[in-house]
Amino acid sequence: MLTRILVCSLALVGGCFSYAPVQSSVAPIGGQVRVHLTDGGYNRMERSREWLSEQYLVGQLVARDTAGSILLELMSEKLPSRQSVEKPLHERITLAREDIRGLEYGKVNTARTTGAILTLAAASYVVFAFARKTLGPAADHP
């Protein structure tokens, strides 16, 4: 049970991420970014990637040039049959300036992360208190 709570808490805390618009010229290399594609960029990407279901890509910014092109490492892809399931990808793609509608830099949202941790701690306390009350003192020892 403790393992399940830890896994759920890590998943919840991992979702405490927010994005803010940024110019590609100042986005930090190595940071996580969400790239919104133009219609033309989406059409070019969709032809070679049947899994592309949104008009944006999320990945790590690897490099950029003065012409406005960026090199992006995609970290995962959504599986076509199950939109909530992702599989590791680690594919690097180059996006030309004309394919990019906008760029957002991802960062951990400390307020949401703190709230999630406190909520999980309270929920864990309630679950363990209930288990101890229901099962007696033996619930403390496996």
Image (tube, grey):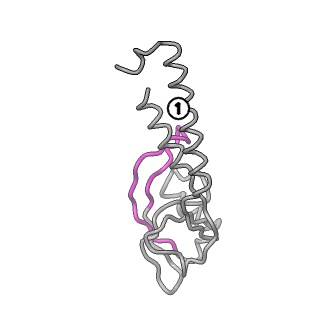
The stretch in magenta equals: 74-96
Residue 91 screen position, x and y as percent = 39, 60
Residue 49 screen position, x and y as percent = 49, 55
Residue at the extreme top of the image, as rendered:
135
Please name the amino acid that badge 1 sits on. Ser
Residue 121 screen position, x and y as percent = 54, 38
Residue 111 belongs to the span the image colors magenta: no
Residue 94 belongs to the span the image colors magenta: yes
- The relative height of residue 9 versus residue 49 in the rendered view (above or below) is above
Q: Nearer the viewer, residue 34 or 11?
A: 11
At x 65% / y 65%, what residue is drawn? 39
Q: Nearer the viewer, residue 109 or 44?
A: 109
Residue wearing tag 1:
124
Residue 102 screen position, x and y as percent = 63, 71
Does residue 98 appear to the left or right of 3 in the view shown? right
Secondary structure, magenta segment, majority class: strand
Does residue 142 appear to the left or right of 72 in the view shown? left
Rendered-image quadrant of the C terminus: top left
At x 47% / y 83%, what residue is drawn? 65
Dividing the picture into quarters, in which one does residue 141 lie?
top left
